[in-house]
Image (cartoon, grey):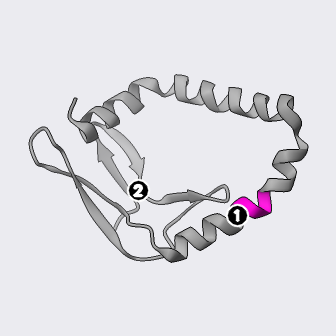
């Protein structure tokens, strides 16, 4: 079973992103279907209590350092994140359109 799928011509990682890493700790997956034509788009990691626990631990571990950055430090990181979205807007729009059917 692959961790990636091609959706609307875009390679998509179908695992969770927790603690700065892609992971699928549980083997459960679910199928995602296009509302446009019913075709299967991909299978994604379902997420279970295992991933939730891992995500909560990662968030708690990161909190002190994140808080210590202050508003300007956090703002700079969020600006880079926003720029990353803008840089990939065509690919993101294609995948979301396929997934949402609009």
Numbered range of the magenta stretch? 58-62
Per the image, label 1 sits on a secondary structure element best described as helix
Horizontal placement of 52 versus 5: left or right?
A: right
The percent coordinates of residue 3 (x first, y second) are 41, 61
Q: In which quarter of the view is residue 87 placed?
A: top right
User: Which residue in the structure is indicated by mark 2?
Assistant: 14
Q: How many marks?
A: 2
Q: Looking at the image, is 90 positioned above or below residue 10? A: above
Q: Position of residue 77 (x, y in %)?
A: 74, 34
Q: Residue at x 86, y 51 (%)?
A: 65
Q: Residues within 10 Å of mark 2 (few under 14, many from 20)?
A: some
Residue 33 x %, y %: 19, 51
Residue 59 located within the stretch drawn in magenta: yes
Name the chief secondary structure element in magenta.
Answer: helix
- The residue tagged 1 is 58
Q: Looking at the rendering, which quadrant does residue 95 occupy? A: top left
């Amino acid at each position: 079973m692959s961790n990636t799928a091609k959706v609307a011509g875009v390679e998509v990682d179908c695992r969770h992103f927790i603690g700065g890493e892609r992971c699928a700790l549980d083997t459960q997956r679910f199928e995602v279907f296009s509302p446009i034509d019913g075709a299967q788009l991909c299978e994604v990691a379902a997420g279970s209590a295992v991933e939730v626990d891992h995500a909560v631990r990662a968030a708690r571990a990161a909190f002190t350092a994140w808080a210590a950055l202050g508003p300007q430090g956090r703002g700079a990181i969020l600006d880079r994140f926003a720029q990353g979205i803008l840089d990939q807007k065509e690919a993101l729009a294609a995948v979301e359109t396929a997934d949402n059917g609009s």
